[in-house]
Every structure is written in C-alpha cells, then in structure tokens.
Amino acid sequence: MTQVDDAEAKHVASVERALSVLQAFTTERPRMTLVDLAAATGLYKSTILRLCQTLEVAGFLARSGSGHYYVGAATLQLARLHQEAVEPAELILPALRELVEETGESACFNIRNGDNRVCLYRIESHHRLRDHVMVGDVIPLKFGAAGHVLEAFSGGKSPRHAQIRKAGYSISLAEVSNGVAAIAAPVFKGGGELAGAIVLSGPRSRIDDMTLKRLEGVIIKAAQALSKRFGSTYLTYS
C-alpha cells in the first residue's frame, strides 16, 4: 500500500467512526453520554471525545448542560435536502410493487384533495380479474378504505375515525365498486405530517374475510416501511 492509499484508508476509517457515532442515537436514546456512546460503538472514550468535539463544531452534534450529546441542527438541513432531492415516485412505486408481488392484488397510493381523494400512483395486479382504478381518478373521501384513512388521520372526529386511528388501517367492502374489497393504511412524512394512504384492493372472490385478516399486518408493515422512506418516525396509531 502506498502512502497515499494508506492515508485514504485512514481517512475513510475516520469517517466510518464518525458516522457510527451519529448512528448510535435512536428514538429510544436521543441523548447519550460519552460512556453511552463508547458502549454503543465499541470505540475508546478518547476517540469518541475527539469525534464528538469535531461533530459538535460542524453542527452535527450538540451538547446539553448536563454533558449529554444529541443530534445537532445540521442534520435537519441534510434531511430537508434529501426530501427535496428525492422524487415521491422513487419512494412510492417500489413499495407498491412489493405489495403486488407479495399479495397478488393491486396497490395504489392516494392523497387528500379537499373532500376528495386522488389516486396518485398505482400498480396493477397480475390477475385478469381485478378492480379498475386509474391514476388520476378522483373519489369522494366518504367512499372506500383510503378515504376513511385520509379523513381519520387528518382531523376526522367521528367514532369510526377514532377506531381507524387506533387500529392503524381501514377496510371497505363494495363502497366504490361492487364486489371489491380494499384495505388501506396511512403513510407519514417527517414530523408526522400525513403523506397519503397506501391501499390494496381486489375482488371479494379472492379477498375473503380470512384474507383480509392476513392483509391487516401486510398493509400496516408496508405503510410503516414507506413512512420510514419518507423520513418519518411517526409509526404508532392512536
């Protein structure tokens, strides 16, 4: 290894150590001491101290009066830049494809527009028999699982909305089209802002009551995974 290569290797290693410090913080442990960070990263306290001092100067870490470190404001700027750079389709379409591959049914993503909902993205089922919703379709919020979810998580005050918030999903049977079942869950952006509703739908001949029960966990898991891609940590429903 040449001197240049050796220097580059050391430089990369120092970056990896600094990133390991930032990645040690979690929602369960948003504030950590040097001892906590050493235990979480496996690095010496002397190394942790140098890294924390450097990250603090750069704004990526901050320190409380009690000596606890926490993630600094500079990370917020990176988060904003990430959100501005990433197109929603790059996040949503792969999630819809995963749902279709896992379940065999059609998947779509809806957003609220006043008293209506709009189908923004959709991946069709591979089955010839399927429900027919098109990208751009506008449907009143009061019809369908997606509409109920969008209402419930954007200020809906009815007992049904409260029940949906507690469950984390909504089911509809033949509300938009005869013989069609749908199940939907909310997707959130960073800060807990509602991004939309992710939906699975298909004919009742395939989606019976037993299948719907199984899909409850599937749709919630997909909604939570997509919320994480949007940068949200708001993954509980109550």
Image (tube, helix red, strand yellow):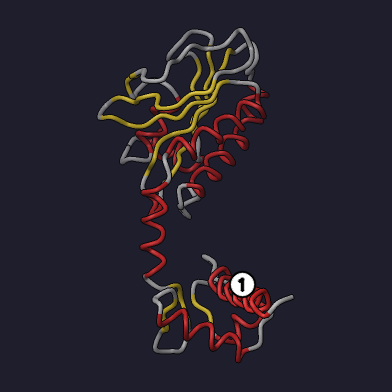
Q: Position of residue 14 (x, y in %)?
A: 60, 77
Quick one: 78 or 180, which is closer to the camera?
A: 78
Residue at image position (54%, 18%) is 181
Q: In this picture, is 30 found above or below 37?
A: above
Q: Is residue 55 left or right of residue 19?
A: left
Quick one: 210 or 131, which is closer to the camera?
A: 131
Q: In this picture, is 185 found above or below 135?
A: below
Please state, as top left, top right, bottom left or bottom right, where the N terminus lies in the image: bottom right
Q: Is residue 133 visible?
A: yes
Residue of label 1? 12
Residue at image position (45%, 39%) is 186
Asked which secondary structure carries label 1, the reply is helix
Quick one: 31 or 151, which is closer to the camera?
A: 31
Task: Identify which amino acid the numbered label 1 is placed on.
Answer: Val
Residue at image position (45%, 37%) is 164
Residue at image position (41%, 73%) is 72
Q: Is residue 40 visible?
A: no
Q: Position of residue 192 (x, y in %)?
A: 39, 51
Q: Position of residue 118 (x, y in %)?
A: 35, 25
Give the quadrant of residue 151.
Answer: top left
Q: In this picture, is 45 found above or below 87?
A: below
Q: In this picture, is 111 found above or below 42?
A: above
Category of crowding for the residue at label 1, using alpha-carbon neighbours closer than 10 angstroms: few (below 14), some (14–19), many (at least 20): few
Q: Is residue 152 left or right of residue 206?
A: left
Q: Position of residue 70 (x, y in %)?
A: 46, 76
| Farthest-out residue, bottom | 46
